[in-house]
Image (cartoon, rainbow, N blue to C red):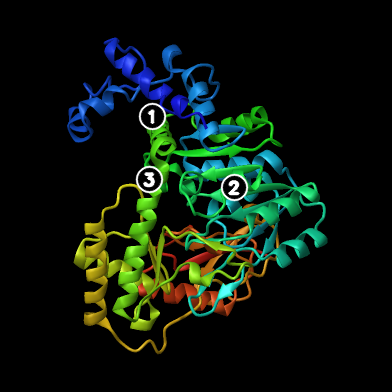
Amino acid sequence: MDIDKQEKAPIYEALQRYKSMRVVPFDVPGHKQGRGNPELREFLGEKCLAVDVNAMKPLDNLGHPVSVIKEAEELAAEAFSARHAFFMVNGTTSAVQAMIMSVCQLGDKIIMPRNVHKSAINALIISGAIPVYVNPGINKELGIPLGMSIKEVKNAIACHPEAKAIFVNNPTYYGVCSDLKTITDLAHKNNMYVLVDEAHGTHFYFGENLPLSAMAAGADMAAVSMHKTGGSLTQSSFLLVGKRINPGHVRQIINLTQTTSGSYLLLTSLDISRRNLALNGKKIFAKVTALAEYARTEINKIGGYYAFSKELINKDDIFDFDPTKLSVHTLEIGLAGIEVYDILRDDYNIQIEFGDIGNILAIISVGDRELALERLVSSLAEIKRLYLKDKTGMLDYEYINPQVVITPQKAFYARKKSVPIKKSAGCISGEFVMAYPPGIPILAPGERITPEIIDYIIYAKAKGSFLTGTEDMAVENIRIVEE
């Protein structure tokens, strides 16, 4: 990587020049640099609204970049060791969907773990691709899904040699990594592409002693949530492509769904954040890792909680672990993760990333400080003191193997009727049910509803999980496929 080149931030620099020109705007957006909306200008600031601008010749065009955005893409590609990098302003959701739609058409099979983000299954609904699920292993003690075992991947390839691609979560929400290099080698030997949801893996490209990144493993495409751990604004991401992929084709796919009014606030945040990580990433993520390790050690001293990390590695379905992840098991103190999540927010003004049935996750990244982590640790200690109880009766599984009956697309567009969830056992779901975050479906369209799943949904609601996906906003009823 050319460090001198990485000091540039072409989009940011172009916006600086634009500001100095004192342009009189007769284009969109209609707030005209904030003058038309004083309340918004006061809230966000004049500097922010002055660069909330539309595409124009000096600032290039996201859908067909030829100047500053093109240069920024080239610098990002170099920083991530990719053939090309696309600036994504519809979030990593659109990057995931662009990956799948770039290599899969109607009827094509794609091998993937079932614990994917809903954006991946949505891509199957849009494209008509057919999932071949590799159900992840389960850690029974923690109740979390793991990575993809090589044995299961080999079996899926052998049973479905016509599949076009293998889709991998790396890392999972909890920090678990699969053997990405071996999976990639297997896929390429069998003429399949490898697509990686790297939403939580930005730091793999810039830190040291971290799990292997998708591009380093030779994967064909990767969706990277720069905003999650890289410091850019929410909704801004990169889509990386490797040497086996035609960037021109991918851009056409992106342009099918991505906005034609790309936010220059998001684009600039990506440009500046890429520069920061390219120049300072090793130092930044060494600090992040140290902060996470400090918090993990202190939380484990409390007792009852289990902040897990690299000790879980088995070189199979836990091939590696992201040490910046602060994932904490809570069931031993008699509280579901979502209950601890709610208590931290409501009683201690601490907002963590998510809580599920048995675990909480705190994201540690470029903006964290030791003092804040000390506050988190002391709050968890006090929660244990105040709320400790016997865990008898606690539900301890986090992932249920699905029974796939029909494809997601067929189920989503089928004739459906609404029934109470409590009376839906044996039916085929026509919609999603998921806790958000993390947005991994408990049920996806086309899957059989079982008593186990119904119990899980009822339990999750009772514990306070924010369930989404159903047409019924109260999540009391579910639309099922009419058979």
Question: Residue 406: image x %, image y %?
Answer: 70, 61
Question: Residue 42: image x %, image y %?
Answer: 17, 32
In the image, residue 11 sits, relative to residue 320, either above or below, namely above
Question: Residue 379: image x %, image y %?
Answer: 23, 70
425 and 379: which is toward the camera: 379
245 and 129: which is toward the camera: 245
In the image, residue 34 sits, relative to residue 178, either above or below, namely above
The quadrant of the picture occupied by the C terminus is bottom right
| Secondary element at tag 2 | helix
What residue is rendered at 36% in x and 53% in y?
A: 288
Few, some or many residues within 10 Å of mark 3 (<14, 14–19, 20+): few
Under mark 1, the amino acid is: Thr
Under mark 3, the amino acid is: Lys
Few, some or many residues within 10 Å of mark 2 (<14, 14–19, 20+): many
Q: Which residue is mark 1?
A: 268
Res. 393 image quadrant: bottom left
Decide if residue 433 is on the left or right side of residue 246: left
- C-alpha separation, residue under disc 2 versus residue under disc 1: 24 Å
Which of the two discs, 3 and 1, labels the residue nearer the N terminus? Answer: 1
| Secondary element at tag 1 | helix
Q: Which residue is mark 3?
A: 283
Decide if residue 166 is on the left or right side of residue 4: right
408 and 395: which is toward the camera: 395
In the image, residue 32 sits, relative to residue 394, either above or below, namely above
| Secondary element at tag 3 | helix
Q: From the viewer's perspective, is the residue at label 2 or at label 3 nearer?
A: 3
Q: Which residue is mark 2?
A: 214
- C-alpha separation, residue under disc 2 versus residue under disc 3: 21 Å
What residue is rendered at 24% in x and 26% in y?
A: 47
Under mark 2, the amino acid is: Ala
Question: Residue 251: image x %, image y %?
Answer: 61, 30
